[in-house]
Amino acid sequence: MSKQVTRSQKDRDGDITGLCGTGWSDSKAQAVSNIGNDSTYYYVSVGGRTVFVRVGTRNGKDYLTTSADGYSPNNLDDLPDC
């Protein structure tokens, strides 16, 4: 299954805590699990440029990010809030 991410939920530090699209909303934990299990692929498409959401690890903690493409409008941080 694939889900187009159009909005992201962020905490007060700006960390991504959830992903949202038309008619759905997944927490960070749900998205990390879905990506890890290969059950759901999340992607962001803005201005005809599409990137996939991936899981990274920093200081032993998982985080959500998009594949680097040098185009900031399709970054999770730059999407409107859920």
Image (cartoon, helix red, strand yellow):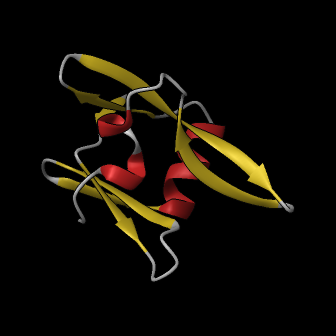
Q: Residue at x 51, y 61 (%)?
A: 28
| Towards the viewer: 18 or 80 | 80
Q: Nearer the viewer, residue 69 or 82?
A: 69
Q: Quadrant of the N terminus?
A: top left
In the rendered image, the residue lying farthest to the right is 60
Residue drawn at point x = 54 percent, y = 44 percent: 65
Q: Is residue 78 above or below residue 35?
A: below
Residue in the picture at 13% in, 47% down:
22
Number of residue marks: 0
- Give the quarter of the image for residue 67: top right
Query: In the shown orientation, is residue 54 left or right of residue 41?
Result: right
Q: Quadrant of the C terminus?
A: bottom left
Question: x%, y% of residue 12?
Answer: 45, 83
Q: Where is residue 59 drawn, in percent x and y?
A: 85, 62
Q: Furthest-left residue in view?
A: 22
Q: Position of residue 80 (x, y in %)?
A: 22, 58
- Residue occupying the far bottom of the picture: 12
Horizontal and vertical percent for residue 58? 79, 56
Residue depicted at x 45% and y 34%: 40
Left or right, 47 with respect to 25, comes to left
The one nearer the camera, 4 or 67, is 67
Which of these two is toward me, 11 or 5?
Answer: 11
From this view, report whether residue 13 is shown above or below residue 25. Answer: below
Q: Is residue 3 above or below residue 15?
A: above
Residue 46 picture quarter: top left
